Amino acid sequence: MRVKQFGFKKRKKVRRWRWPALSAQTASRGRVDYLLVSLITVLTIGGLIVLSSASNQESFRRYQDTYYLFRHQLLFGLLPGLVLLVAFSRISYQKMERYAIWFLIAALVLLVLVFIPGLGMTYGRARSWVRIAGVSFQPTEMVKLLLILFLAAWFSQRGKEMTRDFWNGLIPFILILSVISLPIILQPDIGTLAVVVAIALVMYFVAGGRPRHLAGLFVAGVGLLGLLIAQAPYRAARLMTFLHPEFDPEGIGYHINQAFLAIGSGGWFGLGLGQSRQKLAYLPEVIGDSIFAIVAEELGFIVSGLLIAVFLTLLLRGFKLAQQTQSDYGRYLAVGISTWFASQAFFNIGAMVGLLPLTGIPLPFISYGGTALTSTLAAGGILISISRRS
């Protein structure tokens, strides 16, 4: 399929009026959004503090070293993430628009790697990890950012009128989303699929998608989710646990009941940093999707509420940045990245407090995972770059 079919055109043929572009010298002198930088800094440092406490028992149990997992997060998550954050914040985000089709190709290649024997690794029920030359990473965490970079350029080049069209807007969008979603379904990783779909739908709406098209996509998505639940008994069990948490507390309801116990034990002010009892082999996935329960147990309701407020403020700041940005590409990037952070935090925290079924996705900036932290910090650097040139 030729590139033109995806909506990209050569620059010399584009005649649409755009806002006057900033020169490189003027752009480099733009003021950084210090509130945005502060939010990212608070989440990163706060996440490392919480992880150092939540991971010590698990780290000692696996490696006989209390801080092994914490050091691993520093070396393979924080350090490369900070390098990418600084790099992306200093270069013009507009330069990335020309490589949009390569971002899509890279996303597809990463998703295919998990199915190659000898490279793909299974964690739990999902074949979602890849190991190359002794280094393991989770491709779907990088795919989220690559998809945002591609969709932002695709929507920017097509324009709102083209996006509103059924055959030239909605149908190609469905095809692109399907190509990305199918490998994620086959892994299977339904939690990541929910985040990817949420990001894509919000970007499609902001780019001018018609509400009735979105309503149709929502109905189709609910139907697909029903089929996926019917296909796998463990998903039906998770749904049953969500509807009736008290059912089978020693079996399928064990995870959510232990999370409730951890959150309830924290009270207003928590038991104190490092004083969690649930991390002592009671609560599953304490360094992954259950880490919010550890935050609530050790630091209490007030700090947990402040954490949620930080994510909400980051979402609002990202959308405000999108309003201030003169570039369509920058606008869609800001919306996509902000939606990524907020929707993933919503799915994670919502599952821990019983508002949503368990999804198994990490809490951005907080949960253990070098690929996840690196990708989120890189996305944060792009937001900072947009703020400097808005």
Image: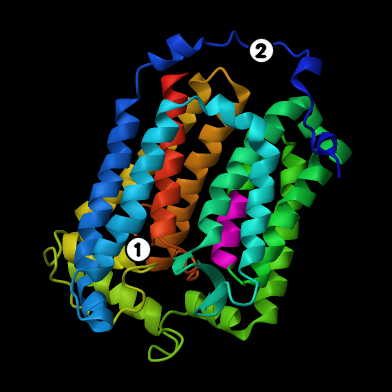
Q: Main secondary structure of the magenta part?
A: helix
- Dot 1 alpha-carbon crowd within 10 angstroms: few under 14, some 14 to 19, many 20 or more: many
Q: Quadrant of the N terminus?
A: top right
Q: Is residue 42 left or right of residue 94?
A: left
Tell me which label, 1 or 2, sits earlier in the chain: 2
Residue 316 picture quarter: top left
Whether the magenta-drawn stretch holds residue 131 is answered as no
Residue 35 picture quarter: top left
Mark 2, residue position: 18
Mark 1, residue position: 368
Circle 2: residue type:
Arg
Indicate whether 197 appears above or below 87: below
Q: Residue at x 60, y 39 (%)?
A: 149
Q: Nearer the viewer, residue 380 or 253?
A: 380
Residue 221 coordinates in the image, percent (x, y): 70, 59
Whether the magenta-drawn stretch holds residue 194 is answered as yes
Residue 8 coordinates in the image, percent (x, y): 77, 31
Q: Between marks 1 and 2, how big is the CA–CA gap?
A: 42 Å
Q: Is residue 242 left or right of residue 159?
A: left
Q: Residue at x 51, y 43 (%)?
A: 339
SS for dot 1: loop
Indicate whether 119 appears above or below 78: below
Q: Residue at x 20, y 56 (%)?
A: 49
Instruction: Answer yes or no: is residue 118 visible.
Output: yes
SS for dot 2: loop
- Dot 2 alpha-carbon crowd within 10 angstroms: few under 14, some 14 to 19, many 20 or more: few
Indicate whether 39 appears above or below 12: below
Circle 1: residue type:
Tyr
Q: Is residue 98 left or right of residue 234?
A: right
Q: Residue at x 66, y 37 (%)?
A: 100
User: What stretch of residues is rendered in magenta?
Assistant: 190-198
Residue 386 coordinates in the image, percent (x, y): 47, 26
